[in-house]
Image (spheres, rainbow, N blue to C red):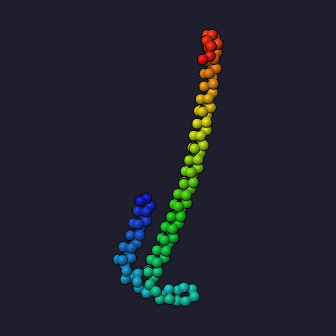
């Protein structure tokens, strides 16, 4: 796992430990003003719930970024593989052309040597 994962787990562990130690205060009902109405509810539990939602959204966004990065890496890898294959084919083509050229040059040199030596072609 990555270091940021360990840090996040440690922070959630500390928040959880803090909530357990202070559970009586977390679960004590409090008067909350919702702008349209007043409600009696435990503020600590509501804040823990909001923290959980924020954490889930954070991890979903992090997963989205990781997946996008993996897709982009995969795309670039395919492009590089295609470019490598094209370069290999071009190199093989040049080697083949060089081989053909070398064989024709050697045949021409052999013919000139045979002509100079005076041997007939076999």
Q: Residue at x 58, y 36 (%)?
A: 92
The quadrant in which residue 117 appears is top right
79 to the left or right of 19: right
Q: Residue at x 54, y 54 (%)?
A: 73
Location of residue 84 with respect to 96 vertically, above or below: below
Q: How many marks?
A: 0
Location of residue 22 with respect to 70 vertically, above or below: below
Q: Residue at x 49, y 76 (%)?
A: 50
The quadrant in which residue 20 appears is bottom left
Location of residue 77 with respect to 29 vertically, above or below: above
Q: Residue at x 41, y 66 (%)?
A: 9
115 to the left or right of 50: right
On-image quarter of the N terminus: bottom left
On-image quarter of the C terminus: top right
Nearer-the-camera pick, 71 or 116: 116
Could you say where residue 115 lies in the image, as x and y percent from the top left? 64, 13
Could you say where residue 59 lies in the image, as x and y percent from the top left? 49, 67
Could you say where residue 72 lies in the image, as x and y percent from the top left? 56, 56
Could you say where residue 57 lies in the image, as x and y percent from the top left? 51, 70
The extreme left residue here reads: 21
Nearer-the-camera pick, 92 or 23: 92
């Amino acid at each position: 796992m990555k270091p940021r994962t360990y840090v996040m787990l440690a922070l959630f562990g500390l928040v959880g430990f803090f909530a357990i130690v202070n559970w009586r205060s977390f679960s004590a009902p409090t008067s909350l003003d919702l702008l349209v109405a007043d409600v009696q509810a435990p503020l600590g539990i509501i804040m823990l719930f909001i923290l959980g939602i924020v954490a889930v959204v954070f991890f979903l966004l992090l997963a989205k970024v990781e997946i996008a990065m993996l897709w982009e890496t995969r795309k670039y890898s395919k492009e590089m593989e295609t470019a490598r294959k094209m370069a290999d084919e071009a190199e093989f083509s040049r080697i083949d052309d060089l081989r053909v050229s070398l064989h024709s040059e050697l045949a021409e040199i052999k013919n000139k040597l045979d002509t100079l030596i005076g041997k007939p072609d076999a």
